[in-house]
Image: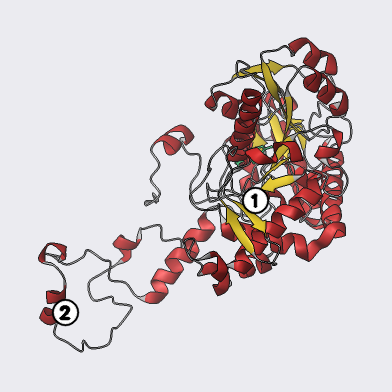
Amino acid sequence: MRDNRVIYEKAAEGRNGYGTPALQRSAEELLSILPVDARRTNDAALPEIDEPTVMRHFVNMSTTNHHIDKGFYPLGSCTMKYNPKRNDIAASHPGFANLHPLQPEETAQGALQIIFDLEALLCEVSGFGATSVQPVAGAQGEFTGLAIMRAWQNERGQGHRNKVIIPESAHGTNPATVTSMGFTVVQIKSNAEGLIDPDTVRAAMDDSVVGMMTTNPNTLGLFETHIEEIAKIVHDGGGLMYMDGANLNAHMGIFRPADIGFDMMHFNLHKTFTIPHGGGGPGAGAVGVTKELEKYLPAPRVTATTDGTYRFDYDRPHAIGRLHAYFGNFAHMVRAYAYIRTLGGRGLREVSENAVINANYLKAKLVEDYDLPHPQPCMHEFVISGNRQKKLGVKTADISKRLLDFGVHAPTNYFPLIVPEAMMIEPTETESKHTLDYFAQVMKQIAREAETNPDIVTSAPHDTPVRRMDEITAARQLDVAYLED
Ligand SMILES: Cc1ncc(COP(=O)(O)O)c(C=O)c1O
């Protein structure tokens, strides 16, 4: 039986799990070293508990939630793929893990080289002339890109421009970042195929537009096929083209954004190149730009000197500033570097090919039982609709709750907003055919249950440590320290 009590409730006096060596000096003597106002006046309220119980407590807690090491996690747009453990081992190498950000450059040459080489590798994958790995999230990469757009427009005497064109199929962070930058979003509609129509962009383009942001592949999992024409319209109108490249895992080694007219993009290293993703943990949202825009990238930049060493260059008068303390999330740079070097160019291409094949395979298995608003071939993810099931009284949220009974995490629900009862599914390249077949079979079973026994779906989950939560209260009044029985 699961014991859901917190560790303080499990503790009892005398239930010690440790012993310490006898003191060499008296407690009074040791205490006298501390200034009086730094000394405790009462005992610390630490739980007394034996070591196996502590270990079981945390191991059980780690399996209470769903996570990628426990089960399939097709959360569209989030790329919850298996992260090879070898990359974590590389990042925790003492030579990296024990570095101090303020130690002299000459004692951290290996680390600087990793940053330098990783930026060069990202340039190769994307086609851009320069990259900065300093931003620590995809959304921060977007912020960086828009700040660069602003700096570029200001320098051209176009500082009055304040609008950014965004298609309705964009990822939610795109309009949010535009607004946080003080710009205004000009939202344009997608066409019947779920793609951006160049004529719609032409109609939205004027001399108040800073640029355009496009998630590609878009949130329907579809590749934007008119980018070259759209980029020309935006450039002719004096704007810049930003690609949200968080979905780069769909086209590595196949398509390079810089080659068809994008001026900048961000990468989500924590989606595409290993790195545990989710839970609000640290990320890495590198930004790539054309050579012309390189001078605006955040400072400092790592440069290679002619004598074969690396140094930080702080003297960058055009830089938009600094995005993060020190240099970004360095451990993630090591993970991404190890991942790219392990796979090589051909391996990265295979990653994308398999991500796309897996998504199309799964989509074909689900179309019989679920509505598919955009039937054309998808990239690494696709969106189905639970409309058919909703008419039977079973909502998309119910289907997702029922999936938990089968050890599967829900797809992204109700997003993108342009598909009613949306379920956005991203299987990733790391899942086996066996896992995809299992998921398809579970989805089929749930579709049958919706027809014959809807109560079992609408009352799900039945087999999880907590059932249906009040998700709004849970998010607003988060209490991570206590689990109810
Ligand atoms: C397409 C897309 N753009 C932007 C983001 C934002 O990235 P982050 O959560 O690192 O800020 C995500 C996140 O998964 C994404 O999928």
- Left/right placement of residue 165 relative to residue 351 reads left
Residue 36 place in picture, x, y as percent = 10, 66
Q: Which quarter of the figure has residue 346?
A: bottom right
Pointer 1 residue: 270
Task: Find residue 30 and name its label.
Answer: 2
Task: Find residue 379 and name its label.
Answer: none
Is the CB of mark 1 within 8 Å of ligand 1? yes
- Which residue sits at x=58%, y=56%? 312
Q: Nearer the viewer, residue 62 or 215?
A: 215
- Which residue sits at x=39%, y=69%? 54
Answer yes or no: is residue 290 visible: no
Q: Nearer the viewer, residue 62 or 398?
A: 62
- Between the C-alphas of marks 2 and 1, the distance is 47 Å
Residue 308 place in picture, x, y as percent = 70, 67
Q: Secondary structure at mark 1?
A: helix
Answer yes or no: is residue 420 visible: yes
Q: The disc labelled 2 sits on which kind of residue?
A: Leu
- Which residue sits at x=83%, y=32%? 261
- Which residue sits at x=49%, y=61%? 101
Q: Nearer the viewer, residue 61 or 35?
A: 35
Q: Is residue 459 above or below residue 341?
A: above
Of pointers 2 and 1, the one earlier in the residue sequence: 2
